[in-house]
């Protein structure tokens, strides 16, 4: 078989990269690709904290863009040898092999018949390629965090945020200097998209949740891969809005799949098993928050405390009212439709009376405070803290849900964790 020159083969690989970049990338990126520099681009080495397999695939794209087709082929060959179930890598590998003999015009450049019969899977793989590439191209600016993370207690060691529009999960470590992004991963969401409302709608919920448990892979079907981390859907805001359903997990993939299409689950968040393994061995059950948003809004980490100050003032005023033993002032912070695990505001009033009686006007200390803001049609604050009376060594860990009504923050749920 006669092979074309190395230069010709690299040109074909470059044509493939142009398709991947130009068809899928934003306008700013397209300009950079259409007018490339000489093929001396530096290939970024994957960090130990990153999804290494995906980082390797992105390196393949970079090598192709630098006109280094042979190296790209060697690298993707290594990926598919180590992860033969990584369908997207297999597709790129096939295209690079084809590029040695003929021009490749599209990602997954197969025969016309195969393009028709495999239109669904091919479309999903192209969409996955788009999501992965865009995430690598549009990294969050250093020193920024999602706007929901206003205050995270130092006892909360990690936090997770999911950008559904990018099929991306971001993992943060809570360091003494604040939240720091340490890794991010490709993830799949519901077949019908996001904004879960009812049982079986195949949508991924939006909101602030917590990891409630760890289900070991040995107790699950192969379908769930390395295991599962159930989330606290429906949360108290979901319940207030009448949303139904459950069983929303962060889980892995079966042995035959490295990853799934961007929109392919029954509402869960699904990651590759290597990525999920890292999450499982990192997060803390019961305390790691998981924010799932249609699109994350990244803000300077230094500005979030200032944004949260008005709410902290309201929380302090609530504490002062309780500390003073003033029932009427304390009740003024609760909404008429307040509910605590089935208890109405009237029933909760007796609980507050007992708490005020036990306090006997002693100082109330709020410890290990975290509050996350969720904004959609309403403004909600999800608050977790320890409440300890002066002179006591221990107290209750509480969670509250506050909503802003007519410019005032009010509590519509309160309960002990």
Image (cartoon, grey):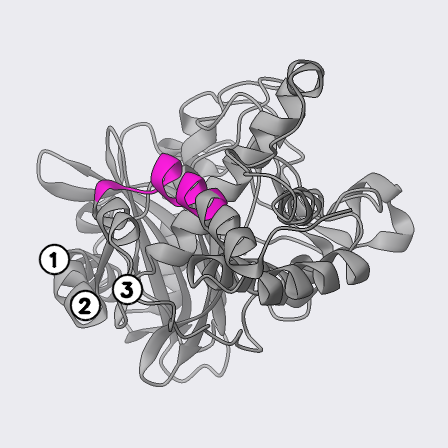
Region in magenta: 16-27
Q: Quadrant of residue 39?
A: bottom left
How crowded pointer 3 is (Cα within 10 Å; few <14, some 14-19, many 20+) is rated as few
Q: Is residue 137 above or below residue 386?
A: above
Give the residue pinned by disc 3: 37
Relative image position of residue 211 (x, y in whole percent): 59, 54
Task: Give the distance between the C-alpha atoms of the residues marked 1 and 2, in whole angstroms.
Answer: 10 Å
Q: What element carries label 1?
A: helix
Count of numbered badges drawn on the protein: 3
Q: Name the residue beneath numbered marker 1.
A: 310
The image shows residue 274 at horizontal and vertical percentages of: 71, 61
Which residue does the numbered mark 2 point to in the structure image? 305
- Image quarter where the C terminus lies is bottom right
The answer to the question of whether label 1 and label 2 lie on touching residues, with beta carbons closer than 8 A, is no
| Image quadrant in which you'd find residue 117 | top right
Q: Position of residue 141 (x, y in %)?
A: 26, 65
Residue 291 seen in the figure = no
> Which of the two marks, 3 or 2, is nearer to us in this view?
3
For the residues marked 3 and 1, what is the alpha-carbon distance in whole angstroms?
Answer: 50 Å
**Foreground residue among 296 and 228:** 296
Q: Is mark 2 on a helix, strand or loop?
A: helix
Q: Which of marks 3 and 1 is nearer the N terminus?
A: 3
Side of 250 where 384 appears, left or right? left
Residue 127, above or below 198: below
Which residue is found at the position 60% from the left and 32% from the top? 109
């Amino acid at each position: 078989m006669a092979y074309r020159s190395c230069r010709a083969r690299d040109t074909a690989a470059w044509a493939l990269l142009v398709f991947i970049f130009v068809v899928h990338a934003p306008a700013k990126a397209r300009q950079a690709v259409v007018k490339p520099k000489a093929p001396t681009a530096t290939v970024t080495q994957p960090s130990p904290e990153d999804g290494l397999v995906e980082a390797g695939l992105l390196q393949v794209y970079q090598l192709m863009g630098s006109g280094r087709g042979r190296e790209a082929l060697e690298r993707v060959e290594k990926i598919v040898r180590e992860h033969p179930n990584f369908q997207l890598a297999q597709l790129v590998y096939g295209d690079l092999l084809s590029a040695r003999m003929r021009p490749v015009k599209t990602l997954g450049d197969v025969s016309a018949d195969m393009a028709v019969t495999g239109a669904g899977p091919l479309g999903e793989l192209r969409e996955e390629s788009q999501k992965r590439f865009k995430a690598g191209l549009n990294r969050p600016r250093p020193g920024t965090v999602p706007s929901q993370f206003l205050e995270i207690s130092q006892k909360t060691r990690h936090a997770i945020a999911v950008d559904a529009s990018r099929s991306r999960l971001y993992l943060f470590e809570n360091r003494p200097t604040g939240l720091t992004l340490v890794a991010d991963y490709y993830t799949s969401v519901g077949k019908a998209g996001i904004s879960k409302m009812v049982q079986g709608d195949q949508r991924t919920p939006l909101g602030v949740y917590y990891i409630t448990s760890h289900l070991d892979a040995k107790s699950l079907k192969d379908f769930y891969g390395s295991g599962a981390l159930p989330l606290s859907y429906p949360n108290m805001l979901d319940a207030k809005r009448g949303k139904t359903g459950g069983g929303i997990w962060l889980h892995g993939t079966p042995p035959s799949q490295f990853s799934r299409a961007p929109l392919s689950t029954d509402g869960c968040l699904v990651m590759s098993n290597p990525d999920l393994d890292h999450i499982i061995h990192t997060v803390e059950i019961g305390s790691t928050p998981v924010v799932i948003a249609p699109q994350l809004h990244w803000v300077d980490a230094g500005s979030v405390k200032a944004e949260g100050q008005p709410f902290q003032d309201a929380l302090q005023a609530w504490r002062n009212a309780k500390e003073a033993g003033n029932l009427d002032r304390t009740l003024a912070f609760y909404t008429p439709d307040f509910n605590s695990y089935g208890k109405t505001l009237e029933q909760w009033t007796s609980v507050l009376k007992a708490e005020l009686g036990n306090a006997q006007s002693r100082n109330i200390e709020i410890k290990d405070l975290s509050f996350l803001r969720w904004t959609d049609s309403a403004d909600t604050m999800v608050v977790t803290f320890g409440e300890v009376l002066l002179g006591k060594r221990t107290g209750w860990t509480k969670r509250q849900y506050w909503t802003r009504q007519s410019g005032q923050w009010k509590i519509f749920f309160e309960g002990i964790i």
